[in-house]
Image (cartoon, rainbow, N blue to C red):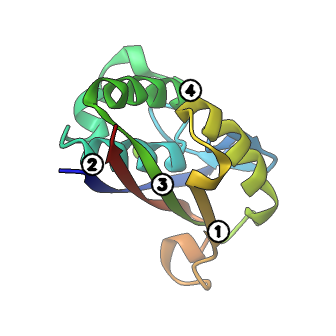
Amino acid sequence: MQYRTGIGFDIHRLVAGRPLFLGGVEIPYDKGLLGHSDGDVLIHALCDALLGALALGDIGEHFPDTDPKYKGIASSQLLKTVKGFLDESGYKINNLDAILIAQEPALTPFKKQIKQKLCPLLDIPDSALNIKAKTNEGLGAIGNNEAIACYVSASLVKI
Ligand code: MG
């Protein structure tokens, strides 16, 4: 088996009084994502895509939100643990593709900064990570600016 693929999805509620972290980058905004951790939907979806490709279950099994150890944790720490699983697997990242869905704030201006944060964490070149930013066309909870969601697909190749 030369290739493996995985998908990840996450959604968190946007609330006042919390910093907004996406892809490990703090985005200036008057609301942030509610969660046991920092609520970083991009990193959570990324972890799930990698865990999926490795057939290692999901982020909730590895980092339960009932465990006080993970309260307020930077999601980049969770990603480091998942990267460790990847390093032990005999596979490496071929490419990652993400879709961030937020009505507000506009995220396109932060895509480069997010890539500069995530690529070194994952030890991948800039060309191996793509981020797309979309609105939800004003529809539903995301469109109403009550939540931000993210999908990630991951492709791994045997080392
Ligand atoms: Mg999450």
| In contact (CB < 8 Å): disc 2 and disc 4 | no
Which quadrant of the picture is home to ligand 1?
A: top left
Nearer the observer, 138 or 81: 81
Q: Earlier in the sequence, mark 1 or mark 4?
A: 4
Quadrant holding the C terminus: top left
Mark 3 is on which residue type?
A: Asn
**Which one is closest to the eye, mark 1 or mark 3?**
3
**What residue does disc 1 label?**
133
Residue at the (27%, 48%) spot, across then down: 53
Secondary structure at numbered mark 2: helix
Is residue 126 shown left or right of residue 36? right
Q: Is residue 146 visible?
A: yes
Q: Earlier in the sequence, mark 1 or mark 2?
A: 2
Cα–Cα span, label 4 and label 3: 23 Å
Q: Is mark 3 within 8 Å of ligand 1?
A: no
- What residue would you read off at disc 3? 95
Q: Residue furthest top?
A: 69
Residue named by callout 4 = 74
Q: What amino acid is at disc 4? A: Ala
Q: How much space separates mark 2 and mark 3, taking CA atoms?
A: 12 Å
Circle 2 residue? 53
Which of 68/43 is in front? 43
Ligand 1 within 8 Å of the CB at mark 1: no
Alpha-carbon neighbours of circle 4 within 10 Å: few (<14), some, or many (≥20)? some
Query: Disc 2 or 4, which lies upstream in sequence?
Result: 2
Decide which of tag 1 and tag 3 comes sooner along the chain: 3
Disc 1 versus disc 4: distance between alpha carbons? 22 Å
